[in-house]
Amino acid sequence: MLQGHLNNSFLYSPSLVTLDLSFNQLYGSIAKWIDRLSSLNYLILNNNNFEGEVPNHLCKLNQLRLIDLSHNNFFGQIPFCLLDGEDSDAKAPTSGSDAKAPTSSIAVAPALAPDEVGDWPSMGKEETIPFTTKNVSYLYEGKVLTYMSGVDLSCNKLTGEIPYQIGFLTRIHTLNISHNNLTGSIPMTFSHLQQIESLDLSYNNLNGKIPPQLVGLYTLSFFSVAHNNLSGKTPERINQFGTFEENSYEGNPLLCGPPLPKCDANGSSSSMPRASTENNEDNNFIDMEIFYISFTVSYIIVLLGIATILYINPYWRRAWFYHVEMWATSSYYFVVDHLPTPLSLRSM
C-alpha cells in the first residue's frame, strides 16, 4: 500500500541486488538515481501507477537479468539505449541484416554457471522473485532464479516500432511487450533469441508478415501475436511452431494458414468467401420473407375488393350467389353419383 513518488531511500545502496516495489500505488517517473544501483539484478516495479517514458538512465544497469515494468502507464517508444548500452546514441543501421550485436544490454547478464553459484551472496540464495512467463506468474528462487532472464513491458501505453536490437538479447528466456500500441513489423532479428521460451507480442498494432525464420526458435513453448494487423501466412508448422494453436494467431483478419483457415491461391483467407456466402443466404432468407408477406397482403386486398364490389352492385351480387349455389349443387350431385353403391341396396 505504498503511495507517492520514489524517494531517495535507495540512493546510497550500490550493493542492492533486488528492488521489488510491485503491487503498490507509486506514481510519477522512475527516479534518476536508480542508475547508481550498479549491482541491481532484479528490478520489479509492476502493478503501480508509474508514468512517463521508460527512462534512459536504466541503460547503465547492465547487470539486470529481470526487469518487470508491466501494468503501469509508461508511454513513448522502447528506448534504444535499453538495448545498446553506452552506444545508444550511435546511428542505427538501416536494416536488421547489417546490424551488429550491442556491446552491453539490459537483461542479458550471463546466468551463473553451476560452479559459480557457491560465490553468490547468501541473501541472494534466499531471494524470491515473482515474474510472469507463459501467461503464468511464478516465484523464482535459489538456483532457478540465477538462470532466469526476461523483460516484461506489457500493459502500458508504449508506441512506435519494436527496436530490432531486441533480437540481440540472446540470453533472455521471456519477452512480453503485449497490450501496448506498438506498430511496424516483427523484427527478423528475433530469430536470434535462441534461449527464448515465452514470446508475447499480442494486442498491439503490428503489421506485415511473421518472419518465417522464427521456426528456428527450438526452445519456444509459448508464442502469441494475437490481435494485431498481421497479414500473409502463418509460420510453417514444424519444430515448436507445430504446437501453437489458433489462439496464438487469432484477431489478425489478414493472417491465414494452419492452424487458421487455409490461404487460397492469392494468399487470402478462405474464411472471406464463406462469410460472403452466409451473407447471401441471409439476403435470400430476407427476400422470401418479404415475398410471403407481400403475397398475403395482396390476397387480402383481392378478397376485400370482391366483397366491396358485391356489396355495391346488387346485380353482380345476385349473379355471384347464383353461380355459387349452382356450383355447390353440381358438386353435391357429382359426389353422390360417383359414390360406390352399398351391397345391401344392390341385393334389394
Image: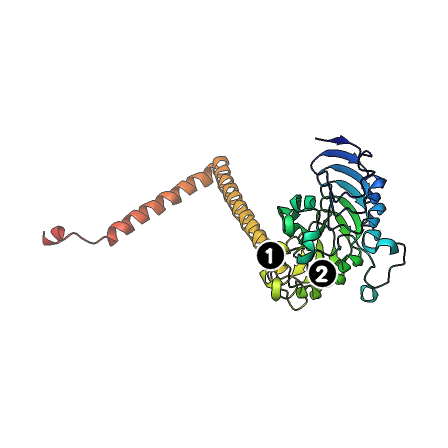
Tell me residue 73's x, y (percent): 76, 40
How far separated are the C-alphas under marks 2 and 1? 23 Å
Mark 1 = which residue? 246
Q: In the image, is residue 11 above or below residue 200?
A: above
Closer to the camera, 182 or 287? 182
Task: Describe residue 244's horizontal placement relative to residue 254 as left or right.
Answer: left
Instruction: Pinpoint residue 33: horizontal percent, then vertical percent.
Output: 85, 40
Q: Nearer the viewer, residue 9 or 286?
A: 9
Q: Which residue is mark 2?
A: 193
In terms of depth relative to the viewer, which is nearer, 143 or 183?
143
Q: Is residue 16 left or right of residue 265?
A: right
Amino acid bearing label 2: Leu
Residue 234: % across, % down? 66, 62
Q: Quick check: 246 left or right of 90?
A: left
If you read the primary sequence from the N terminus, does the residue marked by circle 2 or circle 1 appear first?
2
Residue 148 visible in the current orientation: no
Q: Report helix, strand or loop for mark 1.
A: helix
